[in-house]
Image: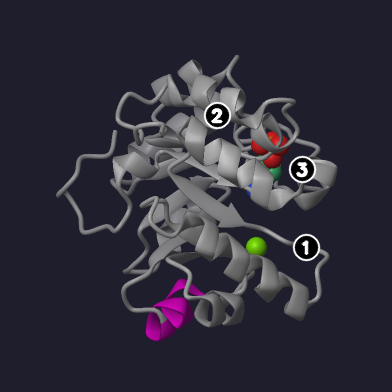
Amino acid sequence: AFRPGRRATRWQPSQALCLVTDAALCGPRGVLAVVDAAVRGGVGMVQLREKSLDSRDFLERARALKSLLAGTGVPLLINDRLDIALLCGADGVHVGQRDVSVDDVRRWLPGAIVGLSIESVAQLAVLPDDVDYLGASPVFATSTKADAAPALGLHGLAALRAATDLPLVAIGGIQAGNAAEVLRHGADGLAVVSAICAADDPQAAAARLHAFLPAGREPR
Ligand code: TZP
Ligand code: MG
């Protein structure tokens, strides 16, 4: 597993439970209310992921989330959009293989937390220098992301673990019923969408997941 100090990274174990937002799954209660509850339950990193908002609404939501999280110590990352991250003062950016590069993000946000999705061991061969964590994507099949790569499975996750020292955050089909085995196969963190966004009680759902991560941030 990830050993702090082994390689420079801005990712911290307190960020091990990551909520990736999906506004449709949050429903009428809204993204902000779900994030607020999830942070109370122990979520230590929030990634705002918006695939259908126009830029102005995306930025407005990002700024509102940044205010909500101010003073909690929970970093806000923006999925894909360096421009939105710059404009809202986000703490980081998460990019995929076909998004703007980690190097380009780093040039504009030198101190930010930068995450990169990895879908195969082969993709580790061309890793940028200054990435803070890797998203192992997707570990299990998921209906939340329509264009997700084929599932890595637990063996694929373990293969990634064996091939990198970087913090590895698992995503895709993760919920309380499989969190323990995902961690056993080498994940340092868990990123979830539906397990929290679609839960009746997002705070309780986050707390249940948080319990698998002894190093995770203290719920409040
Ligand atoms: N990237 C890879 S899988 C995924 C993303 C954004 C969606 C994961 O959603 P869920 O509901 O936690 O399976
Ligand atoms: Mg992307």
Residue 103 % position (x, y): 42, 78
Residue at 81 percent of width and 75 percent of height: 54
The one nearer the camera, 219 or 133, is 219
Neighbor class of circle 3 (other Cα within 10 Å; few <14, some 14-19, many 20+) is many
Neighbor class of circle 2 (other Cα within 10 Å; few <14, some 14-19, many 20+) is many
Kind of residue at badge 1: Lys
* C-alpha span from label 1 to label 2: 23 Å
The one nearer the camera, 75 or 142, is 75
Residue at 47 percent of width and 17 percent of height: 180
**Of marks 1 and 2, the one in the foreground:** 2
The image quadrant in which ligand 1 is located: top right
- Image coloring type: one colour
Residue 189 appears anywhere in the view:
yes
Report which residue position mark 2 lands on. Answer: 206
Report which residue position mark 1 lands on. Answer: 51
Kind of residue at badge 2: Ala
Tell me the magenta residue range.
101-108
* C-alpha span from label 1 to label 3: 14 Å
Residue at 47 percent of width and 82 percent of height: 104
Pointers 1 and 3 in contact (C-beta within 8 Å): no
- Residue at disc 1, secondary structure: loop
- Residue at disc 2, secondary structure: helix
